[in-house]
Image: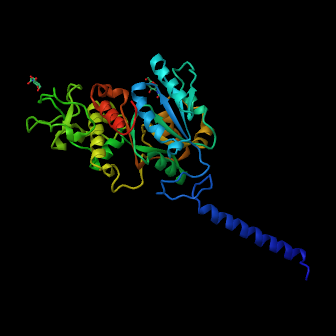
Amino acid sequence: MRKLGIPQLLAWTAILLTSFCLIRLLIQQRRPGSAWGAPYLADAFTEKPPGLIVRGLVFYGRRDRAEILQCYLERNLVDQGGWLDEVIWVLNTTVDSDITYLQQLLASEPRYRLQEVRSDGLGIGFHHAYDGLAPSSLYIKIDDDVVWIGEDTISRLVLAKLNHPEHLIVSANTIDSPLMSKIHLDRGAHRPYLPAVFQNTTDITTTWDYTEYPRWDGPSDYRLTWMDWVDPSVPWLPAADIASTPIVDVEYDPWGNALTDWKLGCQAHLSLLQNIRDDTLSAYYHDAEEFHYTDGKRLSINFIAFLSDDILPHLPFEDDDDELWLTVSLPAKLSKQVVVENRALAAHFSFSYQHHLEKTDALARYKQYAKLHGCEL
Ligand SMILES: *[C@@H]1O[C@H](CO)[C@@H](O)[C@H](O)[C@H]1NC(C)=O
Ligand SMILES: *[C@@H]1O[C@H](CO)[C@@H](O)[C@H](O)[C@H]1NC(C)=O
């Protein structure tokens, strides 16, 4: 056999190296954004990418909210066929009874972990909750007052984040959200509801199922706007015409009326329960693209997915406001987007500005729904 000369050897080596690199490139392109090497399809929701660790991060304060959430989280643990490998409960309360409840939870579920955040003189230092992020992990941050989660919400968020590493944050499409409530109006997802101010409500009992309530009755020219005062303890009933209900004036504004007004929250929640009952949840995303882009607007971070490696190099926060930092400052600095996965649905119960929402029966309706669907509450 003829011996190869030095120039030929070099040429062959170059050809081999180039082919090797090209093949590697081709293989990588077939696995878009997958740091874990698992191929996946955008709509393959049944299988979690092997080797991927998904951690829930819950900012916990109130038992009466968190007990509903904990039931949904339990179902989303990997042992139950869900995608959460563990849930980290970040303690944000000094109320003894709420702390006792959390201790019970932690004792009952080995996949639950506690993280205490140290105070740093600026109130409770929530940015420290992010200091403890494990590298190369996918996190789902969830507020303790998330009171309903769609069956495929967590898997959709995970896959959207993995498939789109170019987006910094992927948020759930949350019900009662300052930005999304207006989008839900435009998509026709909200339903007509009015408080029963003209009816005798003595015999009304709380149920999640709107068909068991009497129809709203009152003057045909009655119209309630979000600015009108109404007693929050009066139950809301299904009405005929959405044009006479508060939600038609909901704003697309992070500081707008969807953040501050409890009536808009109440109507959004009862609409969701009706959509669940009628199997019309697609109203929240039909005809929409995969994502709603927030384009630099502040978004509530009640239910979001992110990769720890996107966040860790940029800590600490400039201030105590993690929402501003995660959805406005950091995306601007990195030229990345914050997106809402339109089909990943969840309900966030209330903002502190909407405190009257607690006097309505909306939370009791969610609780009853959860109980009927296997939650021990
Ligand atoms: C912590 O609890 C306080 C008081 O309930 C609440 O206002 C605040 O939003 C909570 N913080 C987080 C990050 O959940
Ligand atoms: C409302 O209904 C209850 C029970 O049907 C009745 O006892 C009560 O008198 C009614 N109240 C008014 C103001 O009509």
Which image quarter is the C terminus in?
top left
Which image quarter is the N terminus in?
bottom right
Q: Furthest residue to the bottom?
A: 1
Which of the pair 304/209 is nearer the observer?
209
Q: Residue at x 56, y 25 (%)?
A: 117
Locate residue 321, reporting x and y percent: 49, 30
Numbered label tally: 0
Q: Residue at x 32, y 28 (%)?
A: 354
**Could you say which quadrant of the image residue 173 lies in?**
top left
For ligand 2, the image quadrant comes to top left
Residue 332 visible: no
Q: Is residue 190 left or right of residue 14?
A: left
Locate residue 306, reporting x and y percent: 53, 43
Q: Residue at x 35, y 51 (%)?
A: 285
Q: Is residue 2 above or below residue 267?
A: below
Which of the pair 176/271 is nearer the observer?
271
Q: How is the image coloured?
A: rainbow
Q: Is residue 293 left or right of residue 234?
A: right
Residue 228 visible: yes
Locate residue 266, reporting x and y percent: 28, 34
Locate residue 62, reporting x and y percent: 43, 25
Which of the pair 124/1 is nearer the observer?
1
Q: Residue at x 36, y 41 (%)?
A: 179
Q: Is residue 102 above or below residue 289?
A: above
